[in-house]
Amino acid sequence: MNYTLSFMKIEFIKSKKNISLYIFTFTLLFISTILTFILHLQRVGLSGNQNIPLNYSYGGYAFGICFYLSLIIYCIFIDSDTREEIKSNKINILFTQSANRISYYFGKILFFTIFLFFISILLTLICWTLSSKLIFAQRPPRLSDNTAFPPSFIFLNLVVQLLLLIPSILFFVNLSFISGYFFYSSAAGILFNIFVIIFSIQLKSLILYPLNKMSFPNQPIFLPKIFDNKSLISLLILIVLNIIFFFIVKFFISKREFR
Amino acid sequence: MSEILRLENISKNYGNFKAVKNLSFNIKEGEIVGFLGLNGSGKTTTIKILAGLLYEYDGNIFYKGKKEKNIGNKIETTFIFDSQNFYENLSAFENLLIVYYLNLNKKKNNLDSRVENNSQTVNKKNIKKEIIKVLIEIGLEDWINKPVKFFSRGMKQRLALSSALLLNPSFLILDEPTNGLDIDGIYFCEKYFERLKSQGCTILLSSHYLEEIERLADHIVIIHKGEKKFDGDKQSLSVLKIIGANYFFNKNIDKNQIENLQNFLKNNNIGIISLNIKENGFEIIFDKDSITNIEFVNNFIKDNFSGLLFIEPIQKHLKELFFDKN
């Protein structure tokens, strides 16, 4: 555990001086702001004062799009950062000290999972704050019985779904680490990451299931439950997948040779 | 001195290419072992096997009498590679901080042992002080907070060596540390290794500079094309070996006589590397396996060549022989 923390600190030291990471992050936050406005102006979803209960989805749409973008950008970043450490022989320093390779894996994936989670919080704040200020002001969304939609529900829903996103984030971080560590070619790594993320978008209800609940449906339906059986199953599947990744990495990480 | 490391029949293949073949040698505590060989001779491969960067190999490694797969993560060992790269965007201080974080337990032990009355604990202030002290000691006091990308090769090498100062290892393994350094840098490194040795540190120093190894090492291992060619102290490397002879005559040599000599060598399976005809004589360089037949050849020449004035043996130092053949 000590060395996992050490590797997390190392990633933090590296990130502080990594200009491209700042650029990616600020670009993402900028895109999320612009996108929310654009979706608002294009009237994606319907406004809350119409007689349709749950139509304030564009905060969620904007978040969803930016979240995919952030996944693509940061997964490629993790992939290339890991590969660069190997190709430039920095791995010689990292792997010949007291710390071991598993700590390196844990340190890296935990740091980037926390980092991506933090980015997700920022994106959510931007998208939802903007959408609520633009459209909810004076005309809160209403339920089918015309009662105002409780803001506490929106807030609680966002918090719970963000927390549930952590296993999904870990899933992508794991995959990008694996591609960076085990794929020799950068092009293969980038293609692999893009493929996985696009494929996951298609399987949104399984791998990125919390996003479904963050961008509420735009047709009048029942109030979505924050946590239901489907969510539980998806959560369980993701946790199992992450554990499988861990065992795969644990088995192979020491076997990789660095000439 | 007790044995710290023993390699037994280490072999490593890259596909069909045999990088290291049945390499065995011992390292005793407190000595500097020079690990000598030309580029591509298998030095770095051997060190990477020791470091655990190469995982699959044949043979055994014994560290302090105990069989180990590698010694890369041993608390008391430190590896410094020629190809070691630092994080270019980070400063010298931050790069050493990374080294510190990777050796947390080692540093804690070292600091704890130095701290009097246990009043001081390992904290950020201590770490900072320690790193800055090491950087000053190594001559990088003006570069502490500057990014490594602005460093010259020599400065980078000093930074790599400073990690050994920071960690205070009892076993230091260096892969071609003076590669590409100027005279000043080489002098600095040599003084530095001597200092570590005086503190009781065991050093395995890989290099392709014979002079450097001769100056520093107590024990020399020479490797060529993956095979061990020599294992002993540096004195034995200076022993003169006869490799051939010059034959001087009072007249020019007849072609027929030379043909006779060639037939004699051929018929008796005496291998030679060269037979050079000179004015009033010739020179024969024997191959390694035939040098024992030199007396036999001398007798033949005495009996069959007229006008022989004298025979002068050709000698070379053992070390020259290794590098001539390499």
Image: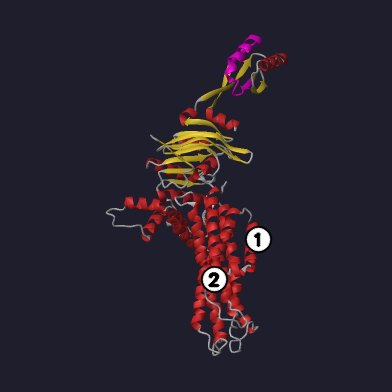
Residue A209 sits in which quadrant? bottom right
- The residue identified by callout 2 is A229
Which of marks 2 and 1 precedes in the sequence?
A: 1
Tell me where residue B192 appears, x and y as whole percent.
Answer: 43, 44
Q: Residue at the left extreme?
A: B117
Residue tagged by mark 1?
A: A191
Question: In which quadrant of the rendered image does the N terminus of chain B lie?
Answer: top left
Gap between marks 1 and 2 measured at Cα: 34 Å
Q: Which chain carries label 1?
A: A
With respect to residue A235, does B222 lie above or below?
above
Q: Cβ–Cβ below 8 Å for labels 1 and 2? A: no
- Counting the numbered discs, the total is 2
Q: Is mark 1 on a helix, strand or loop?
A: helix
Q: Picture quarter containing residue B249?
A: top right
The part of the image, by quadrant, that contains residue B40 is top right
Residue B276, relative to residue B308: is it above or below?
below
Residue B117 visible from this viewpoint:
yes
The part of the chain drawn in magenta is: B283-310
Residue B270 versus residue B277: which sits nearer the camera? B270
Q: Quadrant of the C terminus of chain B?
A: top right
Q: Position of residue B49 (x, y in %)?
A: 52, 42
Q: Which amino acid does label 2 sit on?
A: Asn
